[in-house]
Image (tube, rainbow, N blue to C red):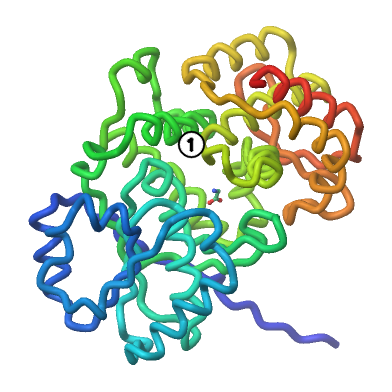
Amino acid sequence: MSNSFMFKPLCFQTEIIETDSKELHNLLLGEKEIVFVIDKKVLNLNPSLLSGFADQRIIPVHATEEIKSFAHAQTLITQFHQLGVNRSTIVCGIGGGITTDIASFVASIYKRGTRLWLIPTTVIAMADAAIGGKTAVNFEGTKNEIGTFYPAEKVFYNPEFLQTLPYTEKHNGLFELLKISFIDDNVKLGRQIFTDGLSMKLILTSVHAKLKICINDLSDRGDRRKLNLGHTFGHLIESIYKYKIPHGFAVGLGLRIALRCSREYELINDETFTAIEKRLSQIPLTVFLDPETLSKIKEQGKEILLADKKNTDKLTLVLFKGLKPDIVVHSIDYSDRVLEIIIEELGKQC
Ligand code: GLY
């Protein structure tokens, strides 16, 4: 006779705190054991944010996709070691998705996990990267190939960061909000989103929508996979274009490819296709891709597509299904048609 025990699944707690610069600064100053991993650009734009902290507690990083590597993780680990960081130290990542991804990754493995706070400063990081616990570094050309699930204790939302964001960075972030608007009806982009711009209210609605899903599926094996809508293709495009295409735009392209695949696999009819296409066209895809790279995709696309970490022997795609936009995780055999669709959509941006 077999015997088994069942334990409650891992659960996580993340406190979402809306704040302003002054309050945030005071909150941080109240912490004695804290070390910052901060995007240099953010530090230069907000010199007072970390005033009052010893220089050695501030680790500025040059936030390009190249630093999301084992080598850079090791550099941070060495710095943590020299600083005497321990499990009760708060590692506070401040910046966009690149900075929050690597800071969280190192926080999750250093001494089997330090405390972790995040202060996202871009829309992508606010709406996606900083919440839900995914940490990451890239590996051998594949985006986010190595990582852990390690949700931050606290994530701070300061609307003032939105004011200093370059226009293209806001535009870039809209694609993550567009994605989640298909998953949760509470996230309403509205027709005027592109002209009226972003509000913290909309971002926080999207944060709640994402957390509602992640809380029941932290490890991304069930419902959370819906959040990868547009991402399987998006990551492929980012890898091939060597991260020269911003993440949001890659997801925007990925959403269009997912839509076309949904029709190809007869998951949606023409009417639904048109309705979704209309919503996608709310956010213009102003990205110009170099045509030479397209030929590389023709050569390597299948290999890269099947090597994506979410795919096993089949392609696991998140597609639209049904009359009303709905999303299923769809497991299909690889088909050259998928590659053709990718190439056609990328060709439109050349
Ligand atoms: N970016 C998708 C997720 O966090 O699951």
In the rendered structure, the answer to whether residue 231 lies left or right of residue 10 reads: right
| Quarter placement of the N terminus | bottom right
Residue 206 against residue 133 in the figure, above or below: above
Q: Which residue is mark 1?
A: 176
Residue 19 against residue 255 in the figure, above or below: below
Residue 40 against residue 288 in the figure, above or below: below
Number of residues whose C-alpha sits closer than 10 Å to that of mark 1, classed few (under 14), some (14–19) or many (20 or more): many
Q: Is mark 1 within 8 Å of ligand 1?
A: yes
**Which residue does the image show at 39% across and 84% down from the upper left?**
80
Circle count = 1
Q: Position of residue 294 (x, y in %)?
A: 77, 30
Residue 85 quadrant: bottom left
In the rendered structure, the answer to whether residue 185 lies left or right of residue 83 reads: right
Residue 208 visible in the current orientation: no
**Which residue does the image show at 39% across and 36% down from the upper left?**
169
Residue 142 quadrant: bottom right
Q: Position of residue 63 (x, y in %)?
A: 43, 56
Q: Position of residue 223 (x, y in %)?
A: 61, 48
- 20, 180: nearer the viewer: 20
In the rendered structure, the answer to whether residue 276 lies left or right of residue 48 reads: right
Amino acid of disc 1 = Glu
Residue 169 against residue 190 in the figure, above or below: below
Residue 12 visible in the current orientation: yes
